[in-house]
Each structure stands twice: as C-alpha cells, then as structure tokens.
Amino acid sequence: MKGDQTKLVHGGDPNPRILGSVVPPIFQSATYEQNEEGGYHDGKYIRMSNTPGHDLLHDKLSLICETESALVTSSGMAAITSALLANLEQGDVLLAENRLYGGTEAFISEDLPRRGVRIERFDGMDPASWGTPPEGAKVLYCEAITNPICRVADFSKLIEWARKHGLFTIIDATFATPILFRPASVGFDLEVHSATKGLNGHGDIAAGLVAGNRKNIEKVRLCLNYLGGHLDAHAGFLLYRGLRTLGLRVERQCENALGLARYLSTHPRVKAVNYPSLESHPDHAHCLEYMDGRGGGVLSMEIEGDAETAQRVCASTRFMANAPSLGGVETLIVRPAASSHASVSPEVRERYGVTEGLIRVACGVEDLEDLVDDIDQALEGSHA
Ligand SMILES: *Cc1c(COP(=O)(O)O)cnc(C)c1O
C-alpha cells in the first residue's frame, strides 16, 4: 500500500476478514480469555488498550503516521498529558512553545509545576532567540500549526537545535493531521493529536493519538494504563470509520480554506487574513516546505469593527455553527477572544495574536460557493 487513501481505507483491516465481515466488528468486551503462558501484561483488557479493536486502530494509524507504533486515547488531552507525564520527572524543565492549545497551556502552567517540573518558554518562530536551553531542560513541546493565527515553525531547524541539546521532542500535530505533515519524518520523538478533530472528522466522539517508535510508545502506554485514559470500544469503531475518509476530507478542507482565504483577502470589511497557504502569510515558506503548501482547514481573519461586530458575524451565519472545534465535515465559526482564549489574560492573548475582532473559521467539506455566500451575508448583515 503506497497511497494515503489506500492506507486509510484498508490499513489495519484483519486478514483474513473476521467471519467475512468487510467492516471490522466492534469488540465490545472489557476482558478476554487468557492463554496459559501469558503474564499480567499479556492479558487483553480494555484499559490496557490492547483489545482487537485497539490493535486495528493502532495498525491503521501507524501506517498513516509512518511510525513504528501508535496508541489511541480517550481524548487529545489524555494523549498530551500521558505523553508529558511519561517523559518528565521532578526537577526536569519542560521547554514549551509560547503559543499552545488552552488545555495544554493550563496543564503545563498549573499542574506540572506542582509535580516539580519547571516550565520555560521558547518562541518557535524566532530561531535567533533560542540560544542555549535552560539547565535541566529535558523535553521540548510545540504545535504544528498554531491556533488561531496559523503559525508554522521551521521544524527541521527546531529538531536540529533540540538534538544538539539532547532534548526529547513532542509535537501536537492536530491542525495538520498526518495527511499534511509527518512529524516523524523530520525527527520528532513523539506526535500527539486530538482525534476529536480531523482524524475522526465527524464531530461525534472524543479521542486522541500518540505516535512514535515502539520504545517511546510503550513508555506512554504504561502511563496511560494507570491513568485510565484508554479509548472506549464504540468510540474506537467510529474513529476507525472516520479515518477511512481522512485524506478526502483534508484535501477538501484545504481547498475550501484557501478559496475562502483568497475571497476574504479582498473583502472590504476584512482587514487581514491568516492562512499559511497565502503568499502573504509570514510562514508561507515553511508551509511550502513541510506541508506541500497546504495550510489545513483553519483560517482566521480580522474584521473592521469591534468585538460586538465580530460577535454578530459569528452569530449570523446561516449554516456555519458558532462552536469551537475543527476538522469536522461541517464548517464552524468562533471568536477566539470569547471561546478558546476567553480565560487568558490580555497580555497572553496579545502574544497569541488574538484580538477582540479576530474570527476563526474551521472549514468543513461543504461547497466553497456556499461557504462564501454564508460568510458574505454574515459580514454584510453585521455592519448594517
Ligand atoms: C482540541 C485540541 C486538543 C485537545 O483535544 P481533546 O480531544 O478536546 O481533548 C489539543 N490540541 C489541539 C491543538 C486541539 O485543537
């Protein structure tokens, strides 16, 4: 199997098929018969993420991520917290990018310090500022496309620097998905994803993913086992189904986002558009180098007017729901200052580029013409 879509459709499928079932069944069983020789860790048990349903997912996902191993989890946050906890000890320093997903930000800044882990920041977009990592630095953590202004770092340069200083590297590649970017190919030790977003793609479950080499995944798996962050059998079935169309959906979302970004760039009510496939984006070169120029399904824009105007735009779209999340088949629109970044201080918000009038659109797979019409009427109406 060479192509992404072929891997997504067939990868992991049991061979021979179970009782001829073309779609693998749901293994709705918490425990499994033990074989005579096996010890405790060989027994199949749902919390150990080693049931037949988990195995199918791990095989499909490691194929598409091009990693030795993969581990599904109950949510993106379960993937992130277990990947970090498995690799940090008291006295270690976590070197974290200065723009991160809100849940991750809260975990590393509020919870990890209570466990004796110190947090230091670095600016992923400014290699000149990196210098020498602080004493005790052990893990470097960053994101593939940052939320909501869609920054893309020079990943090879970052890995080169991290390796030189012996840092273990973890990247949250949720916004990119394995279709646009394969972290293992540039040398990241682990990648984490919220599969609640693009990987499942239908907005109906929470799930997460950690991928990397066997040794690194085993370490995270042991941590996940006692935290209890395994993926449930039915959610696993839905994730497996969603994955089958990942390539098609991401392609369409990228087309929609680029089309919408181009349209909005010339719109009189729009001041600026952030989308990495646009030549005007500060990280356009990195988007070309690492993601073939495809910037993913999310774009953001600054509009003329104040917070209330932006709020009215989000509330007056006809079919785009005013809801957080991304990567689903349906387009979602939010004002980050009132959603993902509502609880952070104005200084932090500024660091993230989240202004009061910023609007984020997470494109689905509808027809571009309809997305343009919907956003257009919302922009017109909100200024009346
Ligand atoms: C949504 C999201 C998460 C958290 O994932 P959950 O599945 O909601 O736990 C982590 N990182 C990024 C970039 C996300 O968008």
Image: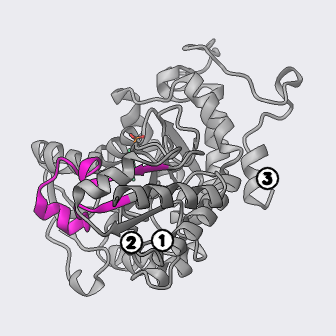
Q: Is residue 97 visible?
A: no
Residue 173 visible (yes or no): yes
Give the mark, 1 or 3, whose residue is nearer the N terminus: 3
In the picture, measured across the screen, residue 213 lies left or right of residue 379, that is: right
Q: Check disc 1 and report the residue beneath it.
A: 264
Q: Is 299 drawn above or below residue 271 in the view shown?
A: above
Give SS at disc 2.
strand
Q: Earlier in the sequence, mark 2 or mark 1?
A: 1
Mark earlier in primary sequence (3, 2): 3
Q: Which residues are magenta?
A: 332-359
Cβ atoms under marks 3 and 2 closer than 8 Å: no
**Front residue of this view, candidates 270 and 241:** 270
Amino acid of disc 1 = Leu
- Residue 6 badge: 3
Residue contact at pointers 2 and 1, CB within 8 angstroms:
yes
- The residue mark sitting in front, 3 or 2, is 2
Number of numbered discs visible in the structure rendering: 3
Q: Is residue 301 above or below residue 68?
A: below
- Residue sitting at 84 percent across and 30 percent down? 22
In this view, the residue in front, 211 or 33, is: 211
Query: Disc 1 on helix, strand or loop?
Result: helix
Query: Where does label 2 land, which residue?
Result: 270
Residue 349: x and y in percent read: 19, 61
**Magenta-span inclusion, residue 335:** yes
**In the picture, which quadrant includes the N terminus?**
bottom right
| Residue 269 picture location, percent across and down | 38, 71
Cα separation between marks 3 and 2: 40 Å
Position of the C terminus, as image quadrant, is bottom left
176 horizontally vs 346: left or right: right
